[in-house]
Image (cartoon, rainbow, N blue to C red):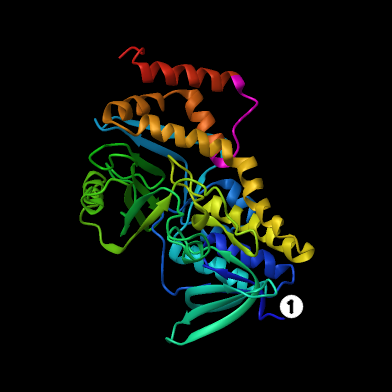
Amino acid sequence: MTTDFDTVVVGGGPAGATAAHDLARRGHRVLMIDREGRIKPCGGAIPTRAIRDYAIPMELLTARIGAARIISPSGEKVSMEIGDRGYVGMVDRDVFDPWLRDRAEKAGAARLTGTFESLAYRGDGTLTLTVAEKGGETRTITTRTVVGADGANSAVRRAVFGPKKRPPYVFAYHEIVKAPPGRTERFDPDSCDVVYDGRVSPDFYGWVFPHGAHASIGVGSAVKGHSLKEATRKLREDAGLADAETIRVEGAPLPLKPMRRWDDGRAVLLVGDAAGVVAPSSGEGIYYAMLTGELGADSVETLMLTGKASALRGARRRFMKEHGRVFFVLGLLQRIWYTSDKRREQFVKMCRDPDVQRLTWESYLNKKLVKRERMAHFRVFLKDMQQLLGLTAR
């Protein structure tokens, strides 16, 4: 089979850049296609496991967060301290993503600035891609395999599965602003604010995340007619950042459930947001995107080495084996606690519990449910049910 490339990766975010890096480093001919200048709206939080697993240099971290402040509709604030368990690293996507793309290029991946338009299967099992280049010219590329890492509105996914196959999502909007030089009465540069309030989001949450010199302030919701800009304005006022200089604003859909199928059974594999891999409840996506990029690279390489298209299924199978239970629990949490302000108040109260805080941080930072603390999980379950049924003392 004669092709221009072994793999074309469409999309250069954390998932696509990781897949391109891993495949190129192993000696495969890789092309990474990415649109210029697009930045995904993102709080920019990454757990210590991502920093460790993907060798993210410390200079890319704009802040190290040691706590999260959970805020209820009534204004009650619960501080969840990480303590000696580690920290949450914060990155700016306008710096982080280009660094990932540069790393992939240094590993040997070729880069093309352009927009994926279509693909066609050839008789020998390879593919032809049509790409609109930055200058307006159309380019045709042949490849053995394709990795679709082009976001929640993935054009690769639409080309392979049709327009109706897509994961459920919320729409995320945020504003990057200049942060105060230090701690103020309402803004803490060492703590992330997570706001559970129906006025901010009737079905998700709002956030104020410090990024060193900047801060990300935003909200997510799937409710049509809910003004994300107005909700963000309220968050800025509450954080004392209404008059802070706005650096940029961004919005995009945020998928909240992995697709049932990531591959076409032939030569195309979806990863990252294109596969729906953003955690329910928390909206966390960077670590999971990079992991699917890694797993996707493994599966694509296996296909190229063995000729067995069934190898592509391995990416989703391995991901769900390790993280499927976490996604299920987070989805359940969102469906139970994000439905009314009464339940949000109960949820924030529950966050005061030491067991909840310990298990939350250990699971988040290490991306594993803490199996060794079965009694702690049982206590959390009982308290959870007590809150849900209104059996706790007020």
Of residues 261 and 17, the one nearer the viewer is 261
Where residue 323 sits: x, y (%)? 59, 41
State the residue lying farthest toward the front: 123
Of residues 155 and 59, the one nearer the viewer is 155
Which quadrant of the view contains residue 200?
A: top left
- The residue at 32%/52% (across/down) is 217
The correct choice, above or below, for 20 with respect to 181 in the image is: below
The correct choice, above or below, for 97 with respect to 73 in the image is: below
Q: Is residue 248 left or right of residue 112?
A: left
- The residue at 57%/51% (across/down) is 261
Residue ID for mark 1: 1
- The residue at 34%/41% (across/down) is 204
The correct choice, above or below, for 268 with respect to 286 in the image is: below
State the residue lying farthest toward the right: 306
| Residue 110 visible at all | yes
Residue range highlighted in magenta: 364-374
